[in-house]
Amino acid sequence: MEVRATYRYAKISPFKAREITREIQGLPVSAALDVVAYSPKKAAALINKTLKSAVANAENNANLKVDGLVVKEAIVGEGPTMKRMMARARGSGSRILKRSSHIRIVLTDEIKIETRETRKAAQKAAKKKASESKAGSGATEAKAEKSGKRAKKGKK
């Protein structure tokens, strides 16, 4: 079962907040709370608040146990941008973009945890399989090319 929590209109740039959300994806909730609690960034406090809200939703609304929860998704989307002007030289002005973001965290109670290491191992296995299949098809193409040259020589 999946449980969601959303923090809308957070006053932080999505680029800055994504740095923290990438670290907690795929982690158990207890580990994710530790990572966020000891991070010195402003985004960590906002993500901590959202993560705790998702845990509370899981406990109270879905009757799930906290120790079995895993962060399935931690997504930061763009919110509205406030446009402001700042005076510059010679009577001109420049724009200041005050960005906001929407933080969404999805927790699941499934045991399957996909970490970076397992993802990288799966990618390596897929690459190896693809290279082996290319090597096998490459040899047959070379044979076909040689036989095509021989056929051309015979026609002349």
Image: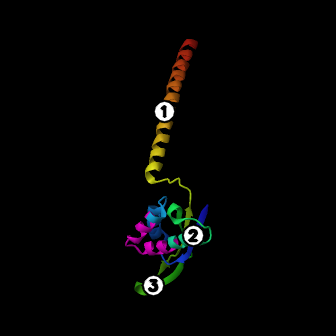
In the rendering, at what x and y percent does residue 145 appear?
53, 23
Which is more foreground, mark 3 or mark 2? 2
Q: Which residue is mark 3?
A: 86
Asked whether 68 or 45 is in front, the reply is 68
What secondary structure is marked by label 3?
strand
In the rendering, at what x and y percent does residue 45 appear?
44, 75
Q: Amino acid at mark 1?
A: Glu
Can residue 78 be seen at all in this image of the molecule? no
- The residue range painted magenta reads 31-50
Asked whether 48 or 92 is in front, the reply is 48
| Label 3 or label 2, whichever comes before in sequence order | 2
Q: Is residue 133 above or below residue 99?
A: above
Q: How many marks?
A: 3
* Contact? badges 3 and 2 (CB < 8 Å): no
Q: Which residue is mark 1?
A: 132
Q: Which residue is mark 2?
A: 59
Overall secondary structure of the magenta section: helix
- Residue drawn 38% across the image and 70% down it: 38
Q: Amino acid at mark 3?
A: Met
| Label 1 or label 2, whichever comes before in sequence order | 2
